[in-house]
Image: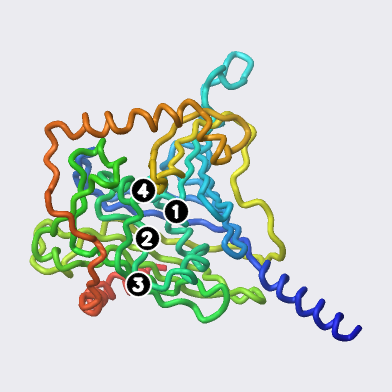
Amino acid sequence: MRLLLFCWLTLSARVLMADVGFVVSGDFKVTYYLKPNPFDSEEGTATATGWFTISVSNCFWNIRYWQSDEANDYTEAGTDGHQVFSIRSFINQNPTNSAGQPSAGVNREIGFVNRRPYPNPIDSLTQVVLWWGYASSCYLETNSESMFFPMRYTEDLLFSQGLYLKGVKLPGMVHRNSRSPRLPATLIIMDDGMAKRWPRMDTQMYPDLMSVKPRRSPYDKGFTNSILSASEFKNLGKVEIPQKIAAQFFEPNPKGVSSSELTLVVEYSIRATNMVETFGSKGFVPVSSHKIFTVDNRFVDDSNAVVDVGYLTEGRWLADDEVRARGEYTNALAKQPADRNSRLIGARLDSQRRSGGRMVFALFGAAIVALVVVLLRFRKSQ
């Protein structure tokens, strides 16, 4: 009897520990250092503010946030352990009829499905920063190499979607907090010095068409892509969570003569205002009772890969077999070979294919020294 009681208590303790999680909410500020790009000629500085709520338990997480410069009610993403589901809600932004009801046929939400362990940076950079700061523990436990999914690709706005779908990782290093769930205290991700391109923007849905070639000197040897630093970790009992997170994103300086001469393009300041430890699991996938136009990329790693399957559902997400049974999936799968070839006409594909996983750890010391000033300046401003 004593042995049975001991076994039961031990098993219960393990289950309880396994289900320990937390909910954290707070606010953030984003600063954009604008420079001319193919989509906008504006220069200067712009800011946005917002709020967030994150729930985490083991490898399950849910992130919900609102941001002042995004024309939607909120953005929410969560995982079922296999793929990431995300929603952008436009319920309050949609046109209404004379009775105050949403106009007929209007999609009230846009959904995305991706089979990667973290949100798509092109869908929302804010989501990715929050994920790294509060929900990346499980990913770090299973990622033994020093190659990471980045918070933001240097090719942002141009080819980020293709790089995310292809699962391109970049070299980096992380120092984790010592207490569970061992979230990052410092994360540095490097660009490997290789420019990754597709013949045209509309061909990046085909991962095999990506070409890789060195960036211009001196950035061909690599440079600091981004830095995330967490501070003021608070002990909630069995978990310890950061109350402040700062993140900076860099690109090569157009006039730079050294790889440490970088341009700061985006900066985040995140503050947790409420934290609570939780026990037991709950649903982490976003729930909706409205029409959702979904862009589905869960099949990108299949032998017959198909991407950007678009379809309309109402009130729920579809399972794999349900999507495969839809005409939109069949049509997308059937048209891709011809579509792929037609989009290659007139496009010049680099003949040399080189892997983008080259390690550049020798650069970390110089890069960190060059960027300490940025971090100190940021922290002093808090």
Q: Amino acid at mark 1?
A: Arg
Give the residue type at disc 3: Ser
Horizontal and vertical percent position of residue 188 = 33, 70
Q: Looking at the image, do the residues carrying marks 3 and 4 touch, with CB atoms under 8 Å apart?
A: no
**Label located before the other in sequence (1 or 2):** 1
Residue at horizontal 48 percent and vertical 59 percent from the top = 131
N-terminal label among 1 and 4: 1
Q: Quadrant of residue 310?
A: top left
Q: Which mark is residue 146?
A: 3
Contact flag, marks 4 and 2 (Cβ < 8 Å): no
Q: Are marks 1 and 2 in contact (CB under 8 Å)?
A: yes
Task: Find the distance from the CA under tag 1 to the CA under tag 2.
Answer: 9 Å
Q: CA distance from mark 1 to mark 4?
A: 8 Å
- Nearest to viewer (mark 1 / mark 2): 1
Query: Which SS class for mark 1?
Result: loop
The residue pinned by badge 2 equals: 149
Does residue 92 appear in the picture of this structure? no
Residue on which the image places disc 4? 165
